[in-house]
Image (tube, coloured by chain):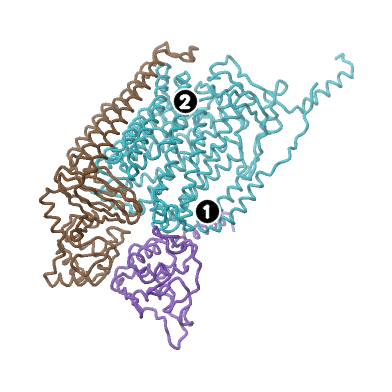
Amino acid sequence: MNEPPEVREEDERLAKEREKLARDGPQLKGAKLEARLERTWHRPPGILGWLATVDHKEIGRRYIVTALLFLAAGGFLALLMRLQLARPDSNLISAQRYNELFTMHGSTMMFLFAVPVMEGVAVYIIPLMLGTRSTAFPRLNAFSYYMYLFGGLLLWGAFALNIAPDIGWFAYTPLSGPQFSPGKRADIWAQMITFTEISALAAAVVLVCTILKTRAPGMTLARMPLFAWAMLVVAVMIIFSMPAVALASSMLISDRLVGTQFYNSWEHGDALLWQHLFWFFGHPEVYIIFLPATGFVSVIVETFCRRPVFAYPVVVLALVSTGILAFGLWVHHMFATGLPRVGYSFYTAASMTVAIPTALQIFCWLATMWDGRPRLQVPMLYVIGFIITFVIGGLTGVIIASVPLDLQLHDTYFIVAHFHYVLIGGAVFPLLGILTYWYPKITGRMMSDTLGKIGFWTIFLGFQLTFFPMHLSGLLGMPRRVYTYPAGLGLELPNLLSTIGAFVVASSVVLFVINGLVSLYRGAIAPANPWGATSLEWATSSPPPVYNFAHVPVVESRTPLWDIAGELPVVTGLRVDEKEILLTTVVAATPDLREPVPAASLWPFITSIAVAIFFIASIFSPWAVVFGAIPSAIAIIAWFWPKEMKREPEPVIT
Amino acid sequence: MSSRFRASLLILGVAATALAACNREERHSRAKPIGETVPTGQSPDTIFPGSTTAQPLDARASLYDNNAPALSEGQFLYTRMNCVGCHSHGGGGMGVALMDDEWRYGGRLDQIAASIAEGRPNGMPAWRAKLTDDQIWKLAAYVRSLSGQPSKDVVNSRADAMSATSPATLTPREPVRSSDSAQQ
Amino acid sequence: MSRRTRAAAVALLFTGACSIQHYQSTFSDAAVEVRQFNILFVIFLVICAIMYLAVIAFLVAGLVRRRRRLANVMEDGRHHESDPLLRTALIGWGVVVGTGLVGLAIASFIADRSMANAAASEKLSITLTANQWWWDVRYNSADSSKTLRTANELHLPVGVPVRIILNSNDVIHSFWVPSLAGKQDLIPGRQNDISITPTKIGIYRGQCAEYCGAQHAHMALVVNVDSYADFLKWWRHQLQPAPPPATPLALAGYNFVTGRNCSACHAIAGTPASGTVGPDLTHLASRRTIAAGTMPMGKGNLYGWVADPQSLKPGSKMPTIALEPDELHAVVAYLETLK
């Protein structure tokens, strides 16, 4: 080299400066960048690190695994119930035990499986789908999981201790009130609601902020994937509906613990108040379960028909209008209670109106299939099963929206058939499809295709065998929640068929789990984009690195990966020595701020322990509300204590 | 001790405390049918002139004393058998107050059951022929709750009826003083 | 399951259903209300079935069509285009669905209004009070000496609109006789009512249709629809007090029932037993079931019930009373005379 020594020194000094460079970009990319990001974003190892994680992928996986465990537990209870109902006048399971079983089955499925699994899948995939490295409020995300876990453990712990609630999953007063439900069973149920409601609210806040503020640059609201739209609507619905049930259950606890009169008709309270408050939450709840599933269907249909969903604006408007309309229907659960009959007609009309956006969504999916080239792989099979099954449930829903029809069918097995058709057909089938679809992304392996197809046909046919006869048992006069029924009413055959079908469904769930577990070790290694899909989660490896993306991707259409010629366009400039994400504006997604992401922290776990002790103790004594608040307050204050921003100054490159 | 042994001890300990659980929630729908209507053995006396020993507590008391379903049944019977007619909701009237600390014939569960079954002077009817033993014990357990004796997580806070007393979960526990201080 | 197999299975279920005795079933024409239900149900079923077939047809067409080469897919770079026919079809679909739903809502509203208006002209009034887990029946009358109290069983005259006033003594129950009419809840603190006009003589069974606790499954009631003459005969008979015991065994039973535990809760007209906690027993033996449909009436079942109700209906308010064998014989002998 013929340079003078001063220039060489200057080069070396500049090279050293660049070594300390803290942002990704043209100077820092590739393997070196990935190593630096890995170091920054990994969480501490060991059990404390496991408890302290704020990685949305880890939290999402925990949600999904825990929810599937509760699905299995609740499903097992269903098998016991079906064994009891297989024959008339059966004495296999006593009345008291059966009442506990259907309460546990309903509560587990609705509060501990259906909503959390949707939240879990969303928490895992939304940041990946939106092209960012973390959710908003990751510690709140961790807290929401722990609250959910403790609520589930409370309920199932009570079941293990033989003090399970026996009041039904919607616990009407006065049966669940202090006089008719002695002991603490109903309080345990009500407090489980508080746990899961707080968990859902926390997760909803996380999702709303993530979806509105952390999207990749260029991903305007009009280019956002339909699943993200579905989760945005669902999260807002959770925020508006969950407080109603939290209020109702807190008022119930208050009645039972300190003798308030909220639900006491004889002291100017009202037994019907419970029903209004509960169903004001309860009806949006079923759409909270269903709308994420419509998001799943949109994702699967797009990928497997090789084109984006037809009429994107119509689907978005359908999602939003379903979310809004869902709040105006709740009285259709109360048509038999003797409220003014003309008022009921309004709720009939509203209940029928809410079918219209869903019908339009179904048209859009079918139109996508028509206009595309559907590939009948396992996730697509589940979508077809969804269409065939859910629409039956939706139409029986239209039937029971009518007051004269509902007065015969309410609280019969016709309703049981209806809601299983919409919940299993409308939510579980898409869920199984989406788990198959995103399994390669989560685990890095493909699920077995053969087992998947066998599993689909088994659950689809088993489901029809189980629940179709229930329409008939309802019409033949079988009410709900009966531990046995008399012979001679014609109920023997439908019930026997349902029991056989239940075991077929159970075996298919077992098959799905086996498929999931075995494929972890024996499945084909999955590339980054095994399905040839278009959304951003497929732009990173399977499974994704802990920091999701090496550079922040930029999006220019609704189908980013299908519209780029070669490399995904990116923006650079986020720090690599600190955890940081890029916030963009709400509508147009122009880059806005660099937001530091909190490090792994034990405070969410400690806070959830303190709050759990507070809630559980307050089942037994009102003083717990006073004394339990203190550790909770301490934990929350410690969690939110402002941290000094210890940041090294960045070198300025001239 | 190996760590495995300690782990299994811990699990057993947790399980034992947990399963020792819940006499509070046990529902007995059938007491022993034989001998149920007529109380077996001697009724526990409450007045022993010149003696200081109290009878031991009847073994059946543990089934009813802190049992929430029993108290709830007792509340049902208290209204339906018209105890309210003389005793109101514990404040008394024609009959003595049941929510205070004075128990002329003893305030233990078995002593109250004996009073209900045998009747007492000055107007308390004998219910032995009209109510089963099981029902009488449940009533006795409920009567004790009127003065706040059972633990607060067992009682029903209120009935689904017009409210006549403060909630049972907030009723302070009165001491149980019988006329004969040798008791208790 | 292929669609044909499924259709065959449904047909089989329905033909199976036709061979059943429909005394607790909506497949009935025994009352004006259930007939209206069936007509409306068939209308809804037909229109919903048509909508369902349309959805399935579209689904099948989409799947069958996938082999064609001119799809608007990403492989051919045309994924941002759509078949223009689809836009028209979407609007058409929306219009069809909307019109269908509006039509169904109007049909439902008309049926609902006609049922509500029909409820204005009853000639017979019954007050039904629900308890855990039995039905307290009171036939109202302007003349209080003609007020009849019974339990777990109704007798209705055919063709006469009856108004049943619904109260509850404890939790929420629901009165449902599917062969006659829809259900209505019995809510403590509220008074509801339901109107039934039976049109066919027969015996029907109803059940509580709102979960009300441990023995919700065993809270049934029997509705006898009689001719007007038979109804009057029944009614006049029910107004009679219980006959005095004729045999020594029945007398021993009478003494036990009126002197011991039974009279604490039960009432028998014409005897000192006047408890109101449990069902009225004046004409117990004339009823068709024991313990709100738990068992059919009969000597053996009466023995079993009186001896140990808690093993037949655990949790019910009737305690198991330790009866000596001769006491049991006496009690049942007396109860059997209460026709």
Q: In this view, does A496 lie to the left or right of A459?
A: left
Q: Mark 2 lies on which chain?
A: A
The residue labelled by disc 1 is: A616
Residue A642 percent coordinates (x, y): 70, 42
Whether residue A492 is visible, yes or no, is no
Q: In which quarter of the image is the C terminus of chain A?
A: top right
Among the chains pictured, the one given purple colouring is: B
Q: In this view, does A298 lie above or below C149?
A: above
Residue A584 at what x, y percent from top left?
Answer: 63, 26
Chain C visual colour: brown
From the top left corner, tell me how far across and down residue A238 is, in percent: 50, 38
**The quadrant where residue B126 appears:** bottom left
Q: Name the residue under label 2.
A: A317
Query: SS of the residue at dot 1?
Result: helix
The answer as to whether the residues below labels 2 and 1 share one chain is yes
Residue type marked 1: Ile
